[in-house]
Image (spheres, helix red, strand yellow):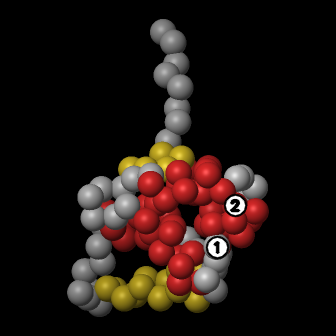
Amino acid sequence: MTKAKSRFSFIADRAMHIGQQIKLILEERGISAIEFAAMIHCNRSNVYDIFQRKSIDTQRLKIISKALQHDFFIDLSKDCFPLSESTISIKWGPQQYIITND
């Protein structure tokens, strides 16, 4: 029995396009594609390729999240599992707190 190669990547559903989400964060922060490429150690054409992606390798997303100091994993999680109206999510520094109204 051979072991299947395990390679995980997040696949954004039609509600969230991960490449466009990354591009939006860059635009909000005034970071150019060239600056972003330097931050994640790739060339500018790779950055434009990232913007077109609906899915992304988790290791690459981790590098991008660290470089931009933005947790895209939380964004994807919220997209898959929206918080109920009785739940409040608070981000304080690197910590995420969830308060429920149970």
Return the residue nearer the eye: 37 or 92.
37
Q: Residue under circle 1?
A: 32
Q: Name the residue under label 2.
A: 37
Residue 74 visible in the snapshot = no
Label 1 neighbour load within 10 Å: few <14, some 14-19, many 20+: few
List the single residue furthest toward the left: 85
SS for callout 2: helix
Q: In this view, does 40 lie to the left or right of 91?
A: right
Identity, as a three-letter code, of the amino acid under mark 1? Ser
Residue 71: percent from the left, percent from the top?
Answer: 55, 71
Identify the residue at horizontal 48%, vertical 75% (top origin): 24
Residue 5 vertical position relative to residue 20 in the rendered view, above or below = above
Instruction: Give the residue displayed 26% in from the left and 58% down from the top.
Output: 14
Tags 1 and 2 touching, CB below 8 Å: no
Residue at (30% x, 78% y) in the render: 83
Rendered location of residue 45, percent (x, y): 61, 52
Closest to the observer, 94 or 76: 76
Q: What element carries label 1?
A: loop
Asked which quadrant contains residue 87, the reply is: bottom left
